[in-house]
Image: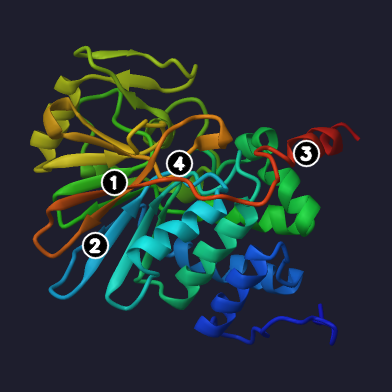
């Protein structure tokens, strides 16, 4: 597919450039798209990169470097830009980890996914992406991402995104101290970090209704000890004793997860061992929550930064949902 001469953006050749990313951000802010060929090229490049990564990526924070962990961004592109404005864009010394649920609900999901992917292609070791429960086909059908891809690009772009989502790692281990995963812990106390390392996520493209992948993407903490049924109808809830045993058995200080709105943007529970971070402030334009992200330096201390939602163009959340429902009926 050739990019016609009328295309007014920066051109993309065989390698991602910062110039292309800067231009893409401006285009997206102004309600423009990148060429469909470039979208396809970015997704394909990143699919190959993340496919080759382990199921649990293991990273440290070296001297002179830092790592920022973000929770759900859910298609709230202008709030993602606010994180970068407050905290800096990804660079060679400042890496980011996005802990799933980049897409769905908010109506700039393709913009977020393409921007994160473009940075991943430019700096494979400077941005890390965990899969969330919304990087899945059934959720994308219901909560807007499939419809948005078709409205802004085409069905092929959605299909390639779907392939890339199923290639994403499921967890990141930071400095052997913090396990970062989208949902939470497991139905079996015997589950270890080694079980995550050994999990072949490529055998199973979608998380299904049971098993390690589903639990990593879907579970939630509860205040009572033990385990309980999930209020979501899939997965389960795990208590402080479950978190304590998992951390002690695996030599961890805490788990960091996302997956749930927190009014202050983050919450520390389970005697400090379970941390939730959520980075979509004023979620769906209806919840008066703040957003947050976690800054980690070489000493591996966690520093929380809370931020407020910023204005965005007048496009409602879930604006593309009807499209996907209508097109699936046709």
Q: Is residue 53 visible?
A: no
Q: Which secondary structure lies at badge 4?
A: loop
Separation of residues labelled 2 and 4 (CA atoms): 27 Å
Res. 209 mark: none
Classify mark 4: residues with Cα within 10 Å, few (<14), some (14-19) or many (20+): many
Measure the alpha-carbon separation of dots 3 and 4.
25 Å
Q: In terms of secondary structure, where does tag 2 sit?
A: strand
Circle 3 packing at 10 Å, graded few (<14), some (14-19), many (20+), is many
Q: What residue sits 37% from the left and 36% below the top?
A: 216
| Nearer mark to the viewer, of 3 and 2 | 3
Mark 2 vs mark 4: in front: 4
Q: Can see residue 21?
A: yes
**Closest to the observer: 213 or 43?**
43
**Residue 52 x %, y %:** 43, 65
Residue tagged by mark 4?
281
- Mark 1–mark 2 Cα distance, whole angstroms, equals 11 Å
To which residue does mark 1 refer? 180
Q: Is residue 111 above or below residue 284?
A: below
Task: Name the image quarter holding residue 163.
Answer: bottom right
Q: Looking at the image, is 185 positioned above or below residue 23? A: above
Q: Earlier in the sequence, mark 4 or mark 1?
A: 1
Label of residue 324 in the image: 3
Judge left or right: residue 323 versus residue 80.
right
Q: Secondary structure at mark 1?
A: strand
Q: How is the image coloured?
A: rainbow
Q: CA distance from mark 4 to mark 1?
A: 20 Å
Q: Nearer the viewer, mark 3 or mark 4?
A: 4
Q: Which residue is mark 2?
A: 59
Quick check: marks 2 and 4 in contact, CB under 8 Å? no
Q: Earlier in the sequence, mark 2 or mark 4?
A: 2
């Amino acid at each position: 597919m050739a990019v016609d001469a009328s295309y007014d953006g920066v051109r993309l050749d065989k390698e991602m450039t910062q110039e292309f990313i800067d231009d893409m951000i401006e285009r997206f802010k102004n309600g423009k798209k990148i060429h469909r060929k470039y979208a396809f090229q970015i997704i394909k490049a990143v699919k190959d990169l993340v496919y080759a990564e382990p199921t649990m990526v293991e990273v440290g924070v070296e001297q002179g470097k830092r790592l920022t962990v973000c929770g759900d961004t859910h298609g709230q592109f202008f709030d993602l830009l606010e994180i970068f404005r407050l905290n800096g864009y990804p660079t060679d010394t400042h890496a980011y980890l996005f802990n799933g649920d980049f897409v769905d609900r908010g109506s700039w999901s393709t913009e977020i996914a393409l921007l994160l992917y473009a940075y991943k292609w430019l700096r494979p070791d400077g941005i890390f992406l965990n899969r969330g429960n919304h990087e899945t086909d059934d959720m994308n059908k219901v909560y807007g991402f499939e419809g948005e891809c078709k409205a802004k690009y085409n069905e092929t772009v959605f299909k390639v995104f779907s392939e890339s989502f199923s290639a994403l790692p499921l967890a990141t281990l930071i400095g052997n101290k913090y396990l970062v995963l989208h949902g939470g812990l497991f139905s079996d106390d015997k589950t270890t970090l080694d079980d995550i390392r050994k999990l072949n996520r490529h055998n199973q493209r979608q998380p299904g209704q049971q098993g390690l992948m589903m639990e990593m993407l879907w579970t939630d903490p509860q205040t009572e000890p033990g385990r309980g049924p999930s209020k979501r109808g899939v997965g389960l809830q795990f208590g402080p004793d479950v978190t304590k045993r998992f951390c002690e058995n695996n030599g961890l200080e805490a788990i960091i997860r996302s997956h749930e709105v927190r009014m202050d943007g983050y919450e520390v529970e389970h005697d400090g061992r379970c941390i939730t971070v959520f980075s979509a402030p004023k979620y769906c334009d209806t919840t008066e929550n703040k957003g947050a992200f976690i800054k980690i330096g070489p000493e591996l201390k966690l520093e929380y930064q809370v931020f407020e939602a910023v204005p965005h163009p007048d496009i409602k959340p879930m604006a593309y949902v009807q499209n996907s429902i209508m097109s699936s009926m046709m």
